[in-house]
Amino acid sequence: MNLRLGAFGRQESVSLVLLGTFVSGCFAIDTNAVFRDGNRIYLVQGIATVLALLLFELLTGAIRRRGGNALYALIGDARWKPVLAVPLSLALLLAAMQPMEQYLCAITQYVFVETKQTVICLYLLPCLTLLVLLGAETLARTARLMLPILLLSVLVTLALVAAQGRTYRLYPIPLSDPLAWFEQIAGATYRAFMPLLALLCIGDGTQTPNALKSAGRLGGLLGGGLAVAALFGLSITFSYAQLSGMPSAFYRMLVEVRAENPTLRLDRATFFLWMTGAILVSAFYLYAACVLFAQSFGVRDIRPLGMSVCALAVTLILVLYYDSETTQAVLKTLYRDAWLLALLPVPFLLIRTRKERVVCGVSS
Amino acid sequence: MRRIFVILLALLCSVGCVHSKSLDEYAYVLNIGVEPGTTMPYLVTFLVSMPGGGTEEITVTNAVLSAEARTFSEAAETLNAAYPGRLSFSRASLLVLGEDLVREGAQTAFLDFSFGKQDLWQNLRVAVARDSIKELFEGLLTDDDPSLRKIKTAVSKLSTRSGLTMDAGYSAYLEAVQDNRIDAMLTYAGVNEWALSPDLLGDGAYPYTGGSLLVDSTLKTSTAGSAVFDGDRMVGVLNGQHTMSVLMVTDAFRRGKRVFTLPDGRPLVVTLYRMRRPQIELSGDTAQVKLYLEADFSQPQTVPMDSETFKAFVRDRIEADLAAVCRALQNAGSDAMGFGRFAAKAFHSAAAWEAYDWKTAYRALKVTFTVSLGLVNDPRDSGLE
């Protein structure tokens, strides 16, 4: 099979997961929904990071018990293989679309003003496709190269924000609505879990099961911590009323703090750096979705599948901008409830492994 | 395959050259001003920096242009039509609102434009103009500082170093209008020949602004204290000394000179420094504000009192002034000191906070101020000893 997994080390895996957790945690949030009734996102992100890491621990434990090194070990011989693989692949596809959609929104609103999304997509699609076709090793090594400068840019921005931010903007903290808490935690857990799931999908490229496990732990923890810090920075820069409905809030934060500081002429450069990171993460998710799908359905060459999936993702994003209200409503519902696609198959995978252990125990 | 890839890459990279424009074809809007129009709702004034000259040497001239319009976009389009080159708003850094406009709260409809669209950002500084904005912009033009950068930086530094005026950004203004937790306080500016007008406490507006007004200089525009708002309506002006009192409570104060009158009628100048973050406790209809300041007294030998009496004298004056400013703001309905920031902490949902009538509660709030004052120079510790 030509899955183009290659081989990459622990640093590369950590970089991929860290970048993914940060991008999904910060650049993929729907500000309308998240800040509608106050600001709790930085708390939610912290809880979600812990839950996502717990899920990762459970899955890696199950994979190890089955003697594998990737998620496919859990679903490879399952009778309901498509039922488990398709929702997970779809969840990864939706997770890949979210940063790209933010990218399109930011670039058409702040950089190439009033340019049509289709024009930007003409440039976006080849980049994504190329990254997906080059495979896991290229993605991981590029993430490793990008990470230091991206981290530096985020930390400098946060340092500037810390000097100007005010903690009163955190209030009122919405504690009274358990349903809203549940919805936000589920959504954030889905976003925090996606890079870990993607890593599990390409686990065969990591050198050992231990490397896979420690990379997931470290990347998830660091990426989650960075996302919490960034969201906290955002929360002390803008009030919930300003954030609600603010597109690409992170770029706005960068611009707000630029007056009289050294980032004055670096905002666009920083923006493109962050957006390149977002494209890389989207490509990572799409590639992982392709690997899972190819392994589950016996597709021997990932390249045609990769091209189709990239085209599908970009087309679906354009549908969000151009198509009828009904189609948009369906896609937005999918976005909102994507956590169900990602999280519901997980208990089945774990229960199945547990049952087999019980059966093995009885037979032995 | 590789050749085709290289050709495609070269084509992609050359896209930026298709509609290229040389630098002298751009004109940069530096300041934007809005005031009531005569035929249209708004008179929009732009201070534009226009490059000219040949290829050898590019000269820059500034011009004040204005257009009447219903929206910002309309005004920008009118201006674009009047200029042969291309206008860029990327260097705009000051938004001036006419006092007549903000007294009515009529600026909100105009300001409802999408930031980023015109390369305009919310880190614009915002000021309120007492006089005609055209005159105000013309007063800013000097040969020494064609980009106006030094002037704008000077206003910011004046705010930090003297505490006599407010350096406010559009983002803070917008937050104040939307959030109801703190009311806006903006730089108040005018041309130097303006007449003395009373502030919210009945004092003159200009005598304490570091001598920037009524000075014969190339700069004909200057600032004096601040304009205070109730929501999106301007409700009054605070002079420099009273502005400092508000900045102390909002923790925007770093240092500044206060002028007190001694019992024998002589003026006493004391430099105050912020020692630590103010503490504000709000429970029910009472609020307690504790400020931590340090006083640097430059003429100790002229004060006819000992350290403790001097400290008590300065502390009492500051507390009395804070209480008077707070009462004046409450009467005007402006929560410029931001007690709403603390009131909001008691709420556990945005909807509950938004439904709460904070302004009515604020007007009835009983506020007490306590100043903890340290002395840098003991008045009796004369340099002659």
Image (cartoon, grey):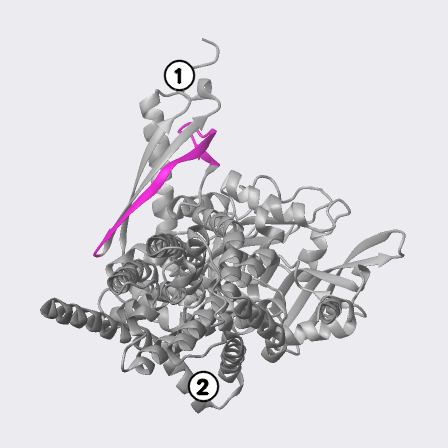
Q: Which residues are magenta?
A: B256-284
> Is most of the magenta stretch helix, strand or loop?
strand
Secondary element at image label 2: helix
Q: Decide: few, some or many residues near mark 2? Use Cα within 10 Å; few <14, some 14-19, many ≥20.
A: some
The tag on residue A237 is none
Identify the subunit bearing mark 1.
B
User: Which residue is identified by label 2?
Assistant: A328
The residue carrying pointer 1 sits among few (fewer than 14), some (14 to 19) or many (20 or more) residues within 10 Å by Cα, namely: some
Instruction: Return the residue nearer the eye: A225 or A174.
Output: A225
The amino acid sitting under disc 1 is Arg
Q: Amino acid at mark 2?
A: Gln
Q: In the figure, is residue B353 to the left or right of A143?
A: left
Relative to B114, does residue B125 appear above or below in the rendering?
A: above
- What residue is rendered at 79% in x and 68% in y? B85
Q: Residue furthest left?
A: A362
Q: Position of residue B154 (x, y in %)?
A: 61, 44
* Residue for badge 1: B380
- Of residues A142 and A107, the one nearer the viewer is A142
Q: Position of residue A45 (x, y in %)?
A: 33, 61
Residue B312 belongs to the span the image colors magenta: no
> What is the total number of numbered labels drawn onto the structure image?
2
Q: Residue at x 59, y 72 (%)?
A: A124
Tell me where residue A310 appears, x and y as whole percent.
Answer: 52, 76
Helix, strand or loop under label 1:
loop
Whether label 2 touches label 1, CB < 8 Å: no
